[in-house]
Image (cartoon, rainbow, N blue to C red):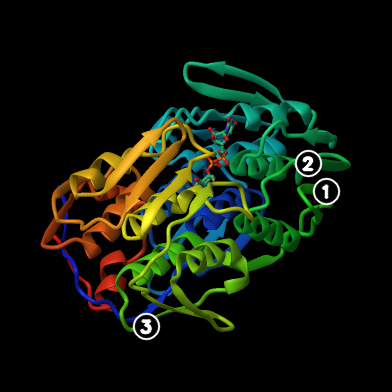
Amino acid sequence: MEKLIIKGNKELSGKISISGSKNATLPILAATILANQVTLKNIPLVKDIFTMVELLNFIGLKARIIKKKNIIKINNNEKNINTLAPYKLVKTMRAGVLVLGSLLTKYGKAKVSLPGGCAIGTRPVDLHLFALKKLGAKIKIKNGYIIADAKKGLKGCVIKFPSISVGATENALLAASNAKGITILKNCAIEPEIKDLILFLKKLGLIINLKGRSIIIKQRKIKNSKIVHNVIFDRIELGTYMIAGALQATNNIIINKINPKIVKSEIDILRKTGVKITIKKSSIVIRKNKKLKRINITTKPYPGFPTDLQAQLMVLLTQANGVSKIKEDIFENRFMHVSELKRMGADIEIKDKTAIIKGPTKLTGAEVMATDLRASVSLVLAGLVAENKTIINRIYHLDRGYEFLESKLKSCKAEIKRV
Ligand code: UD1
């Protein structure tokens, strides 16, 4: 099994270009079921995207990745369509459940494996099914599968989500795209990745308006023209490298190919800790401040601070002066990285949903184990700060979501290798 070895405590400086967003590409790939010919540009070459492409091909679309150009070309010639998403593909990547909305609305039926639990909590799909039922789908759960039926088509309506969910908003949007009449979704997630999905659906000819946390979708006959879409940058990858810079860049790290306006809450939080940030039109320059300040934060749906950066921020706060608190308000079990960070010398205590971090602490290299995507990358960040060698096991989690992680860090003078 592959491992990462990091020789830490090196000064970082250099340039990093941010890849396309995994979490935007996945729902847009699910939306390509609704179209005929699509070219997606700026896609990240990571495992979750390969799995989603495999799923589309299993369904009967012709999806092909052109790796050299970071492009996926998708054709749906409507022949031999299989409205099934099998367990073996959905179990490794929860976003597989997003094909449910597209298949159901277009073909009137779908059988999609329940994604099951994962390291960060139970992650149910009740909100997804709640929305589909409101649109008129009949849904049964049998042998671990969601069996959905809408032979007479889905019908637009008003749906108010009892709580905010990214995936449920996406599935409802996809299902509503071919539902008769108008659908109004209320209390939606409004993450930039959802806005990118809306942009894609508009290219298919749909009329979609976003007002606050409401999304209004007017059905239109979907265009069969060739659609080209450039996927938005990965704001979580950006946040991760900003934190790497905040930890170790005595000179500047310049991070390119981004839109700083989209990551305002992340920039504000980092500035509160004292990190030096210069904002340009499509890049950010970041530099370490030796005297980091403590902060208290709570993870929130966008535009709040993202849960997907909670583990990385925690590493930064181990280096801040005083006691910081992070409350995890999105997932029930997302402190798996804490025990590994403690093995590297961090002083962190967990009380209910809150991690209490005492800093600054000197981190030292250790052999650690990655548990999920973002927890894994927090261990990489800890390894960059720690004295001596850090060995990170189970790095397949990292490969699900970070494109060219080692080469990007190496270009900033990090000593990191895969063995
Ligand atoms: C997406 C992101 C993930 C991110 C998360 C929160 C993708 C592919 N993944 O995941 O990286 O961490 O948003 O920003 O975009 N919930 C329910 N019932 C449901 C659905 C969700 O109770 O039917 C709960 C979840 O357990 C969780 C909360 O709602 O506690 C938010 O989850 P959700 O926003 O749905 O996350 P995902 O879409 O799975």
User: Comparing marks 2 and 3, which lies closer to the viewer?
Assistant: 3
Q: Is residue 36 visible?
A: no
**Which of the marked residues, 1 or 2, is nearer the chain's N terminus?**
2
| Residue that numbered label 2 is attached to | 185
- Label 2 CA crowd tier, 10 Å (few <14, some 14–19, many 20+): many
60 relative to 32, above or below: above
> Is 260 positioned to the left or the right of 217 in the image?
left
> Is 46 positioned to the left or the right of 114 in the image?
left
Q: 188 or 53: nearer the eye?
A: 188
Rendering coords of residue 291 (x, y %)? 36, 69
Residue at 33 percent across and 72 percent down: it is 290
Which label was assigned to residue 216?
A: 1
Rendering coords of residue 164 (x, y %)? 66, 39
| Residue that numbered label 3 is attached to | 252
**Kind of residue at disc 3:** Asn
Tell me the SS state at disc 1: strand
**Which of the marked residues, 1 or 3, is nearer the chain's N terminus?**
1
